Amino acid sequence: MEAPVPASALIHSATLVSAGVFLIMRFYPILELSFYFKVVTAVVGALTAFVGGVSAVFQTDLKKILAYSTISHCGFLIFLCSFGNFKLVIVYLFVHGFFKAISFLCVGNVIRFSRSYQDLRRMGSLFKYLPAEFFFLIFSLLNLSGLPFFFGFYSKTLLFMISDTLYLRDLVFCTILLSCITGLFYSFNIVYYSFFDSKKARKSVYTDAASEALRSFYYSNTTLASNIAIFLLILAACSICAYLINFFLLSLSNASDFYFIFVKSFSFSFGALSSASLLNYSFFY
């Protein structure tokens, strides 16, 4: 994570994430000939998502938190690839790519305000000085965490509904569910310890920001063009993700039939059912 923030935003939102996923998608007609491919890929993806999420929770470096978050989301993508439903893979790629790039750009402004310190233990009370970055960052983190009524929630819901494994079903699904929960914790660490905790940086950082010479009229420590660029990226992300999710929801009869979801919510089973769209994830709802 020694690269500059714009390079990190590109690598962790598009290049690093999509390379291996693209290869699996291209070679899937060959890979699916193996009897064990589906099980092995699902287990490896679930464990990767869990280990990446837990590692992100215990990091104190801002960029390392987002880096391990990327590893966790890579696990979700590999998990999705094991089922051959590439429509959902594309939806998840877009949701993660857009909002991870926005997160990195906002974190870059926070690091720049903190005099290039990336440690959460050297920050605090930045909401007063960087309100624009706070609202942009928390919106992207809510999407990445998968809270209800955000795009990440719908992409992860589709992940649960469409997935199925031959063996180790309960282990894989519980691991995936725990991996999704870890996203709430590392997102909380970023927001609370950098924006709302007590002032932990050097006094000169806050005094210089409060002085008339360096005070910004754009609710940020960057230029107006930077804030406009991030805001336009958010608009583009919301428009494209909304279109993709609605388009693929209409193409998935199991996912779009909410009465079917309501009926299935009264049953809980690990067994193989003929319609395996919900299974035990009624509890997720």
Image: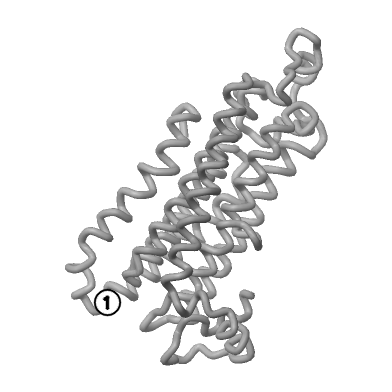
Q: How crowded is mark 1: few (under 14 residues within 10 Å), some or many (20 or more)?
A: few
Place of residue 224 in the rendered image (x, y in percent of width and height, measured from the top left): 63, 21
Considering the numbered disc 1 on the image, is that residue within a helix, a strand or a loop?
loop
Q: Residue at x 52, y 48 (%)?
A: 239
Snapshot quadrant of residue 253: bottom left
Q: In which quarter of the image is residue 34?
A: bottom left
Decide: is 182 above or below 16. Answer: below
Which is more toward the observer, 14 or 58? Answer: 14
What's the coloring here? one colour
Above or below — where is 273 with respect to 168?
below
Say how many tags the image has.
Answer: 1
Name the residue: 58% across, 82% down: 261
* Residue closest to the eye, 276 or 70: 276
Q: Position of residue 273 (x, y in %)?
A: 44, 91
Q: Nearer the viewer, residue 69 or 134?
A: 134
Which residue is under mark 1? 36
* Quadrant occupied by the C terminus: bottom right
Residue 17 position in % (x across, y down): 39, 48
Residue 280 place in picture, x, y as percent = 55, 83
Left or right for 53, reference 48 = right
What's the residue at 52%, 70% (across, down)?
A: 175
Q: In this view, does 53 lie above or below 114?
A: below
Q: Is residue 123 left or right of residue 90?
A: right
Q: Quadrant of residue 152?
A: bottom right
Question: As shown in the figure, which amino acid type bears the numbered disc 1?
Answer: Tyr
- Residue 115 falls left or right of residue 158: right
